[in-house]
Image (cartoon, coloured by chain):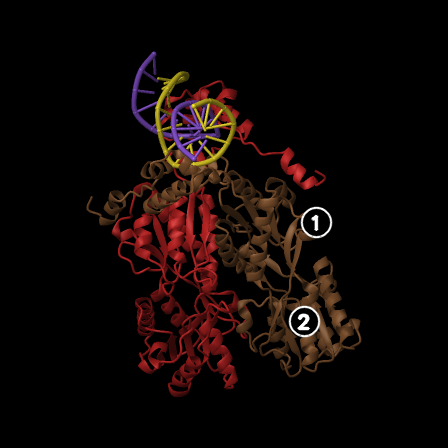
Chain colours: A brown, B red, C yellow, D purple
DNA sequence: CTGAAAGCGCTTACAG
DNA sequence: CTGAAAGCGCTTACAG
C-alpha cells in the first residue's frame, strides 16, 4: 500500500500485554499475578517480595487489565451512563464536563446518552438508553434529564439500582442532588435589600411545581427577616396568566420564548405594583425582562433591578450584564459521583442521605 | 432486608438470554445460532427455515449478544470515543447531542471525553483519553477539541486510525469536517448589501490562522461580485492591535473577553472608516459590539448593522437579537459519522474525500 | 448444511 | 503460599 497512514496502522498493531505475559516475566503463575494486580482481598496471600516483582513486571510491560475479559467475568465495567438532554436544556449541558471529570477521578468513563429529545431519534430514546446501558454493563447511571422529557424513571431505577439524579425526578426512593431554591430566593432578595430596594418582586413561570413553591417560601422568609412586608401583588405566577409557556421546538432545537408573558409580568409588577426589583425565574426570563424593560424606556438597574437564576453563558452578554445565581455545577457533579460511589459500595443510601441540597452562589454584575 | 428498593434489585437480577439459550430453544447448535444472529457472511450457509426459527427464538428470549464476549473475541465494540472540551468552548458543546444521535443510528454508543481543560484534571487529559479509549476498544474517535487545547493529535491518529475531526487539526492525512468560512463571509456580505449597506466592515480576532484568511477572501469576493470597492481600512485584524485576546479562565471556567479590542474596532471601523455594517468574528464579538455601540449612542441596525457567526444561544437574547450564521451542527454530525462509517469499512479515505466543507446558514434577526 | 473443540483474557473455586 | 482446571459468552478454524 502506498498510503503511509494505513501502513503505519498496520505495522504497529497495538497488542497490549496480558496477565500471562506479566506472570511469565515475573516468573509466577497467572493466579498469583492476577491476585496481586487485579485481585481485591487475596493479595495478602502473596509474599511481599513476589508482589513487588510482579508490579515491576507489570509496569515494564505497561500492563492494563483487559476490560472486556473483566466484564465477562462479572466484574465492574468502570463506566457510568449519563442521561441528559442538553439539546433541550442548554443549562444542564454544562454538567457534562464536570461529571466526566469527577467520574475520571473515580476511575470511570462516561457513556453519554444525550440524544434525548433529538428529532432524529424516537420519543422512547430515554428507555432505549436505559436498556443499552444495562447491556453494556455500566456500574451506574446519572440522570440529569428534565422532567418534561418522556422516559420511565421507575424502570430506570429498577434496571439500575445505582442511579443518581440531578433534581428531584419525582420517584420514591430516588437519590438526587438539587439546588436549594429556597436559599436561592433568600440570597437574591437579601442582595436586593442590601442594594436599597424595597419593592422586590418575584416572577416565576409557575408555582404549580413543588420546587417553585420553595422559591416563594425563601422569598417570603427573607422579606420578613429584613423587616419588609409581603405584598402578593409583587408575586407573578406565569402559569396563572394562561399565556404561552416556553415551548421547546424540536424542529429548530430551540426554545420558543413566551415574550407576551414577560410583558404581562412587567405590567403587573412594575406598572401596577411599582416594583423596583425583580427576582426572575431564570436567566432567560431575566434577559427577556431586560429587553422588554428597555423597550418601555425603563432603565436597569436604575429604575428596576433584575436578578437571574443559573448563571448561563448569556449572563455576561446581556446589556446590562446579569446579576444571577450560579448553580455550582462542579460541586453538584462532585456530590453526584460521591453518592454513586457510596451506593456502589454500600447499596442504597439511607433515607436521610438520599437528597443533597446545593447552595447556589450569587454572582453580582451590572443588572442590580 | 426491609428496604424494598434493595429487595427489588435483588429479587429481579437481570440475567439476559445467551446464545446457548437461543440455540437450545431453536433446537440447533450454538454455531448455527451464532452464524444466523451475529455472523456476517456465513449465514447463507444456514437453511432459510432454520434461520427463521432461530430469529423467532431470539426475539422470544429478547436475546442481545453479550458485548464483552464479542469484544474479547476481537469484534467491534460498537462504541465511539468523543473528544471535546465543551467547558472551554460552549459553541461545540451543541455538537454532542447530534453526534450521539447519529452514532445511535449507526448502532453505536458514545464514550465522552469532555473533561479536557477542566481544572480538576491534568493538562494531559487529552492523551489520557486517547489511551483509555484504545483500551476500551472503541471503533473510532471523533475529535472536536479546539486547537488551543494541549494534546497530541498525531499520536491520536496513529493510535486510532479511524479518527474524524471537527475543523482542521493541522495534522497531515487527517479526515475532517469544517464549516466553509469563505462561504460564510460571502453570505454575510451579500445579505448586508441586500439590506442597502455599502461600507461593510470585517472584524476578526486574527488573520494569522489559515481559516480566517478564507474569511477575508470570501469578504473580498462578495464585495467584488456586488460591485463594491475593497477598502482595507474596513478590515479589522484583532491580532495586529496587540490588545488582549479572549482568554479562557480555568478558574472560573469562563472566557475573559477583550472588551478593549472591541472598542478599538469601533474606533477604527465606525468612527474612522465610517462603516455602516460589521461582519463580526463570532457571536461573542457581535454581542460585544452591540453593547459597546449602544454605549456610544450608536443604534443597531439603524446606524450600524452587525452580523455574527455560529448562532449560539445568546443570539436570541442580545438586544437587538443577532443576525448570524448557523453552523449546521446536525449536518456536520451526520457527515462525521458517515465518514467514520466509511473509514471503518474501507480504511482511510482517499485524499480528495478527507475534507468535507459544510455551508453555514444565515439566520436573520433584528441586528441587520 | 451442522457439530465439537479450542481459545479470547480474565477470575474463582478447588487442590496441593 | 502457589498451581491446574473450569468457565464467563462468544467466534473461528477444523471436521464431518
Q: Position of residue B223 (x, y in %)?
A: 33, 74
Most extreme residue toward the left is A2
Depth order, front residue of A10/A104: A104
Q: Position of residue A53 (x, y in %)?
A: 36, 43
In the image, residue A245 sits, relative to residue A318, either above or below, namely: above
SS under mark 2? helix
Residue A351 badge: 1
Q: Is A201 on the left or on the right of A149, as rendered?
A: right
Q: Position of residue A190 (x, y in %)?
A: 70, 75
The chain carrying label 2 is: A
The chain carrying label 1 is: A
SS under mark 1? helix
Q: Position of residue B155 (x, y in %)?
A: 31, 53
Residue at 55 percent across and 28 percent down: it is B61
Residue A187 badge: 2
Depth order, front residue of B93/A47: A47
In the image, residue A138 sits, relative to residue A165, either above or below, namely: above
Residue at 36 percent across and 65 percent down: it is B181
Amino acid at each position: 500500500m502506498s498510503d503511509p497512514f494505513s501502513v503505519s496502522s498496520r505495522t504497529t498493531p497495538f497488542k497490549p500485554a496480558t496477565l500471562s505475559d506479566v506472570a511469565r516475566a515475573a516468573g509466577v503463575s497467572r493466579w498469583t499475578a492476577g491476585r496481586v494486580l487485579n485481585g481485591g482481598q487475596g493479595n495478602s496471600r502473596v509474599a511481599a517480595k513476589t508482589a513487588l516483582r510482579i508490579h515491576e513486571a507489570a509496569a515494564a510491560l505497561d500492563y492494563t487489565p483487559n476490560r472486556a475479559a473483566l466484564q465477562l467475568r462479572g466484574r465492574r465495567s468502570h463506566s457510568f451512563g449519563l442521561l441528559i438532554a442538553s439539546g433541550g436544556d442548554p443549562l444542564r449541558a454544562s454538567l457534562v464536563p464536570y461529571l466526566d471529570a469527577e467520574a475520571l477521578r473515580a476511575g470511570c468513563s462516561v457513556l453519554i446518552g444525550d440524544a434525548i429529545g433529538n428529532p432524529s431519534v424516537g420519543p422512547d430514546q430515554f428507555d432505549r438508553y436505559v436498556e443499552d446501558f444495562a447491556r453494556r454493563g455500566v456500574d451506574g447511571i446519572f440522570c440529569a434529564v428534565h422532567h418534561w422529557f418522556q422516559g420511565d424513571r421507575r424502570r430506570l431505577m429498577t434496571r439500575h439500582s445505582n442511579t443518581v439524579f440531578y433534581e428531584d425526578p419525582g420517584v420514591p426512593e430516588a437519590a438526587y442532588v438539587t439546588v436549594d431554591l429556597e436559599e436561592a430566593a433568600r440570597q437574591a432578595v437579601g442582595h436586593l435589600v442590601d442594594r436599597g430596594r424595597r419593592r422586590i418582586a418575584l416572577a416565576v413561570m409557575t408555582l404549580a411545581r413543588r420546587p417553585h413553591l420553595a422559591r416563594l417560601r425563601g422569598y417570603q422568609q427573607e422579606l420578613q427577616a429584613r423587616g419588609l412586608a409581603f405584598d402578593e401583588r409583587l408575586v407573578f405566577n406565569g402559569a396563572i396568566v394562561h399565556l404561552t409557556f416556553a415551548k421547546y421546538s424540536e424542529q429548530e432545537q430551540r426554545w420558543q420564548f413566551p415574550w407576551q408573558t414577560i410583558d404581562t409580568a412587567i405590567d403587573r409588577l412594575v406598572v401596577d405594583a411599582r416594583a423596583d426589583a425583580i427576582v426572575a425565574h431564570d436567566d432567560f426570563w431575566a434577559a427577556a425582562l431586560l429587553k422588554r424593560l428597555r423597550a418601555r424606556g425603563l432603565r436597569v438597574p436604575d429604575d428596576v433591578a433584575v436578578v437571574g437564576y443559573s448563571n448561563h453563558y448569556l449572563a455576561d452578554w446581556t446589556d446590562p450584564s446579569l446579576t444571577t445565581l450560579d448553580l455550582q455545577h462542579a460541586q453538584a457533579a462532585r456530590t453526584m459521583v460521591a453518592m454513586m460511589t457510596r451506593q456502589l459500595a454500600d447499596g442504597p443510601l439511607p433515607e436521610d442521605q438520599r437528597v443533597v441540597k446545593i447552595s447556589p452562589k450569587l454572582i453580582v454584575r451590572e443588572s442590580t
